[in-house]
Amino acid sequence: MIQIGGGGETSRLQREARANPHIQMLPPTDDRSGLAAMLASADALIHGCEAETFCMVAAEARACGLPIIAPDQGGAADQVKAGAGLTYISGDSRSAAEAIVRFIGQRVELGKQAQERSDSVQNMESHFRDLFALYATEWEKSHAA
């Protein structure tokens, strides 16, 4: 497992992972080609944050044809719905672990689905254009009286 980035629990997680040679914890990166190479060689992206609105890293994973395991809320969940992968209950580590185990059993199928849907990824610009158009339509409907 490779973790890229961090959060409020980074120090604790680094201490716990130190003894496990199968876990690498890397700092945030802006090396897009390096990140793309890591994503291309992975089996899945496991995302841990429910607070992102678009979730660029999940969109990039989808574009690579990579299945996503993500919390059931936030931008990463939207990428799962549009692509291939699994969700878990936000903030629930047991649910996340169960999703990872489910993924192992469905890895081949989810991998094929992710590959087939990899060309349907929206970029951030088109995402927000569509989102604001939806907001405008809903506002017009609500004020059409």
Image: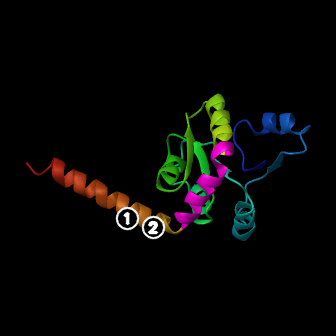
Q: Is residue 8 left or right of residue 82?
A: right
Q: Is residue 11 left or right of residue 18?
A: left
Work out whether residue 52 or residue 60 is closer to the camera in this orientation and state it: 60
Per the image, the residue denoted by label 1 is 129
Q: Residue at x 66, y 43 (%)?
A: 105
What's the magenta bit mostly, secondary-structure-wise?
helix
When the figure is inspected, residue 130 is found, relative to residue 93, above or below; the finding is: below
Q: Residues within 10 Å of mark 2 (few under 14, many from 20)?
A: few
**Residue 138's x, y, as percent?**
23, 51
Confirm whether the magenta stretch covers residue 38: no
User: Is mark 1 in CB contact (under 8 Å) with mark 2?
Assistant: yes
Image quadrant where residue 112 sits: bottom right
**Residue 60's x, y, as percent?**
60, 62
Colour mapping used in the image: rainbow
Q: CA distance from mark 1 to mark 2?
A: 6 Å
Residue at the extreme left of the image, as rendered: 145
When the figure is inspected, residue 38 is found, relative to residue 13, above or below; the finding is: below
Q: Residue at x 54, y 49 (%)?
A: 76
Confirm whether the magenta stretch covers residue 116: yes
Work out whether residue 119 or residue 122 is closer to the camera in this orientation and state it: 119
User: What is the three-letter code of the residue carrying label 1?
Assistant: Arg
From this viewpoint, is residue 67 visible?
no
Per the image, the residue denoted by label 2 is 125
User: What is the three-letter code of the residue carrying label 2?
Assistant: Glu
Residue segment shown in magenta:
104-118
Q: Residues within 10 Å of mark 1 (few under 14, many from 20)?
A: few
When the figure is inspected, residue 91 is found, relative to residue 22, above or below; the finding is: above
**Residue 142's x, y, as percent?**
17, 47
Q: Residue at x 30, y 61 (%)?
A: 133
Number of marks present in the image shown: 2
- Report helix, strand or loop for mark 1: helix
- Report helix, strand or loop for mark 2: helix
